[in-house]
Amino acid sequence: QRLAAEGRETAASACLRSACGLAPAARAVAGRPPAPALSRLPGPRRSAFQLIDANAEYAKELNLLRYVLEVAEPGLAAGVCQAVERYGQHVLQRTNMWLKIAGDAKAAVLARALQAAPPGGEVLEIGTYCGYSALRLVLALPGVRISTLEFDPVHALIARSVLIAAGAMDSVDVWTGHSSELVTRIVSRPSGPGPFSAVFMDQRGSLFHEDLRILEAGGALLPGCAVVADNVLKPGAPLYIWHLRSGDEHEMQLVHLEEFAMPADDWMAASVWQPRGAATARHDAPTEIFRWHAEADRMRERARNRGRSVSFAEWASFAVELRTAFAALGIAATAEAS
């Protein structure tokens, strides 16, 4: 990270490759055009990449870093993003593991939503995981400063490494800590990040509404701020959807699409925030919203249990149940991902 901060990202990437036991990356030859971003990416059927210690803690994420360093051209953010997607779609396909990223169609929805962001602000991501969506934000909004928050220090370290490999550390600040504490610190520091023209929320869905309220009340959002939240159907964010619907500050679309690398339905919530001056009276959430909020959190806890996780079929079934419950409350998808 020190090398990257000094602008020596090639040296930083070389150190990462060495730490992962990989050979040095091929050097560019003077007078020849650079190789395509994915020139070393193996096809899904030809991949010889082997997962190491697949059942160990953080094995999925550490193997992701190894894969990115092995197959993606150093310094090319688009190639690193495609390598992360390939890892989730094809390498992990041989296992019962799933990579929680807003990839493929979700990345396209995120990029389109950011086109509505007003100029002049910074971008906040809550839920860095391994740095994939932070890179998507860099690609969608070149030159814009991005702050990304991650609770898990191991995930934050892996994300920094992925960002270094992509040559993007000069555009992204990775903060480590609980989202509500970090968001509170950010809005209370005059010299800190912000104000924000776009926010992407990909942390625990049961916290979406709490973190957004802090940003709204703290004056951290620019008028017209684009706010995108992932996984609001699977496993769901009922209180967040109710927060957006029960006031008049957000113009919201619920975009229906398939989960990345999983045959299950999901929604992304894309909204535009417009302050209305006086505080808006909100209707209290009905009992059913709180019940499904608790059910969604139970599914999240099950998914964290490596001994008894949640199968793809169970995720798909739960999404159908929650969609049915939402429909009974007059809540349904308003757009389809193209």
Image (cartoon, grey):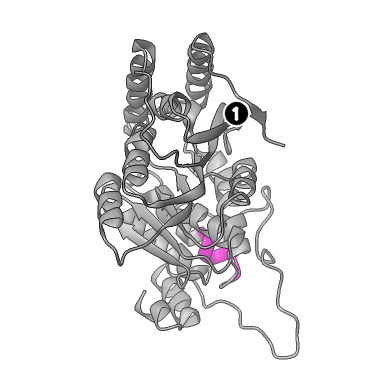
Is residue 53 at least partly visible in the picture? no
Q: Nearer the viewer, residue 195 or 63?
A: 195
- Number of labels in the image equals 1
At label 1, the amino acid type is Pro
Quadrant into which the N terminus falls: bottom left
Q: Main secondary structure of the magenta part?
A: helix
Return the x and y of residue 291 as percentages of the image width and height.
34, 15
Return the x and y of residue 214 as percentages of the image width and height.
31, 43
Q: Nearer the viewer, residue 2 or 244?
A: 244
Which residue does the numbered mark 1 point to in the structure image? 263
Q: Nearer the viewer, residue 201 or 156?
A: 201
Q: Quadrant of residue 186?
A: bottom left
Q: Which range is magenta?
A: 67-73
Q: Helix, strand, or loop for circle 1? A: loop
Residue 70 among those drawn in magenta: yes
Q: Judge whether 100 appears above or below 29 on screen.
A: above
Q: Residue furthest right?
A: 32
Is 109 on the left or on the right of 134, as rendered?
right
Return the x and y of residue 82 as percentages of the image width and height.
62, 56
Quadrant into which the C terminus falls: top right
Is 264 on the left or on the right of 306, as rendered?
right
Q: Nearer the viewer, residue 116 or 173?
A: 116
Residue 274 among those drawn in magenta: no
Return the x and y of residue 281 as percentages of the image width and height.
37, 25
Is residue 51 at least partly visible in the picture? yes
Q: Judge whether 144 appears above or below 179 on screen.
A: below
Circle 1 crowding by C-alpha within 10 Å: few under 14, some 14–19, many from 20: few
Q: Judge whether 134 appears above or below 105 on screen.
A: below
Q: Residue furthest front?
A: 278
